[in-house]
């Protein structure tokens, strides 16, 4: 018969240690909960998904303001399939385009870096980016119709980022690094400053790069940068996701200028066959042209120049390009250039405008002083002008259309206009 093992006796010290461990676990859990994004956020979802407004059959003869909303964290109106996204004071809200009524709201105590609407014809998401101790690194994806959370991510980031989207990937780009995210917010690539690279051979061998401009286009990312030992500004085209060897694909790179005098060139369009660059006026030799002036230069996905066309513009215009119905509109500071969305070449220029425009019922609407210019999409010929009272505001205006509503971004404010 085997001997019986005496039960283990617990001493007073064992009980004290156990109690300390339990308390530590509880305190750690409370701290995690208290500092988590869920604890610091407030989400008010929509009771039901709104219906998607149909496209306008005609452009308006007259417009009147129907609502306005603050949106300091966007530069161009962000539109889901059925709502206008306003982003201000830590809150991202979906608004009815007709009435301005709130459909859902997501708020965090962190500073809001930016918001972007993406995949409106598919998953229909609104993506909010917040700042923490690691930069603009806290990212939340929300359903565009109801506001329900679908995904989230955190990673290192710069203190300020610009957000853009090409139908496949979202791009978040700062001064020293960029990232691409797929529809589930899984990262495609990170490029630039990487604090703890797992494999230093993943990215092209350039160091200490400052990123001036970046845009996605057809599963590629174009970047205008200046790296260590570069005398001027460089254009680099990368793949949006890593290859099978988990490396960043570099499609091509070329020097845009041989000096860094004056403002850097800016990317204004990207697609399957080209990337378009707004060049303030320094040529490939680094010398200012005899008659200085901005130009639109187009490049292949291998960063090889295709076309070079002078345009009227300022050295460093404000605002961002708008892609709509196969065209790209970009404000140069003096006028609006209209580009072919596929080839990136300039179709025509519209002088004396206030910003980028959008297509409505087959016609192009461009903001001008005192109103909106309605133009033929094919050649830019003006059809008529619609009076719009902007209350003395004469800065950059970005215009987009949702159903029968014209949405203007005027500085940090969204303004909705409809036919009376």
Image: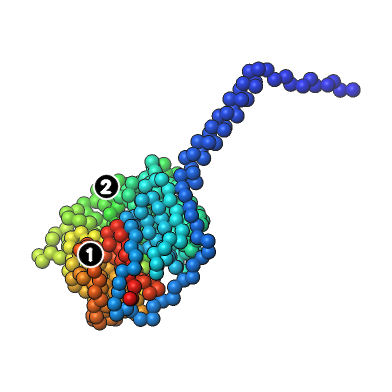
| Foreground tag (2 vs 1) | 1
Residue 401 location, x and y as percent?
A: 36, 71
Image point (24%, 74%), residue name: 387
Residue 168 appears in the figure: no
Dot 2: within a 10 Å radius of its alpha carbon, few (fewer than 14), some, or many (20 or more) residues? few
SS under mark 1: loop
SS under mark 2: loop
For label 1, the residue is 391
How many numbered discs, if any? Answer: 2
Q: Quadrant of residue 317?
A: bottom left
Residues 35 and 316: in front is 35
Residue 241 location, x and y as percent?
A: 44, 57
Residue 228 — which label?
Answer: 2
Q: Earlier in the sequence, mark 2 or mark 1?
A: 2
Dot 1: within a 10 Å radius of its alpha carbon, few (fewer than 14), some, or many (20 or more) residues? few
Q: CA distance from mark 2 to mark 1?
A: 47 Å
Image point (48%, 63%), residue name: 145
Image point (14%, 59%), residue name: 287
Q: Quadrant of residue 250?
A: bottom left
Q: Is residue 199 left or right of residue 297?
A: right
Image point (37%, 63%), residue name: 78
Residue 357 appears in the figure: yes
Residue 248 location, x and y as percent?
A: 41, 54
Where does the N terminus fall, quadrant-wise? top right
Q: Quadrant of residue 288?
A: bottom left
Residue 3 — which label?
Answer: none
Residues 136 and 409: in front is 409
Residue 173 location, x and y as percent?
A: 35, 54
């Amino acid at each position: 018969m085997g001997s019986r093992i005496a039960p283990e006796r617990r001493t007073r010290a064992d009980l004290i240690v156990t109690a300390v461990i339990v308390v530590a676990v509880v305190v750690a859990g409370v701290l995690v909960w208290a500092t988590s994004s869920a604890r610091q956020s407030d989400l008010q979802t929509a009771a039901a998904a709104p219906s998607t407004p149909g496209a306008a059959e005609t452009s308006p003869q007259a417009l009147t303001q129907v609502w306005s909303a603050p949106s300091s964290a966007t530069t161009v109106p962000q539109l889901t399939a059925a709502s206008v996204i306003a982003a201000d004071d830590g809150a991202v809200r979906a608004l009815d385009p007709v009435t301005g009524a709130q459909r859902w709201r997501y708020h965090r105590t962190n500073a809001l870096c930016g918001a972007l609407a993406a995949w409106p014809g598919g998953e229909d998401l609104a993506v909010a980016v917040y700042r923490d101790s690691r930069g603009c690194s806290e990212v939340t994806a929300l359903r565009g119709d109801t506001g329900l959370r679908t995904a989230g991510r955190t990673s290192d980031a710069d203190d300020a980022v610009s957000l853009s989207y090409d139908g496949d990937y979202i791009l978040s780009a700062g001064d020293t690094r960029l990232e691409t995210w797929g529809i589930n917010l899984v990262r495609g690539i990170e490029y630039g400053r990487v604090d703890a690279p797992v494999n230093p051979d993943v990215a092209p061998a350039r160091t200490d790069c400052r990123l001036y401009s970046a845009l996605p286009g057809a599963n590629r990312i174009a970047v205008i940068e200046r790296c260590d030992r570069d005398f001027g500004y460089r254009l680099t085209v990368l793949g949006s996701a890593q290859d099978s060897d988990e490396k960043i694909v570099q499609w091509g790179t070329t020097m845009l200028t041989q000096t860094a005098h004056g403002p850097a060139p800016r990317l204004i369009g990207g697609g399957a066959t080209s990337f378009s660059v707004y060049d303030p006026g320094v040529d490939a030799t680094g010398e200012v042209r005899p008659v200085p002036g901005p130009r639109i230069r187009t490049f292949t996905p291998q960063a090889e120049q295709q076309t070079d066309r002078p345009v009227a513009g300022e050295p460093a215009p404000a605002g961002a390009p708008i892609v709509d119905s196969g065209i790209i509109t970009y404000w140069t500071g003096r006028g609006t250039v209209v580009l072919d969305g596929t080839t990136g070449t300039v179709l025509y220029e519209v002088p004396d405008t206030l910003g980028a425009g959008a297509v409505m019922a087959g016609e192009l609407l461009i903001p001008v002083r005192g109103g909106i210019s309605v133009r033929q999409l094919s050649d830019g010929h003006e059809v008529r002008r619609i009076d719009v009272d902007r209350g003395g505001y004469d800065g950059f205006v970005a215009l987009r259309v949702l159903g029968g509503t014209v949405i203007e971004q005027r500085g940090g404010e969204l303004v909705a206009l409809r036919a009376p």
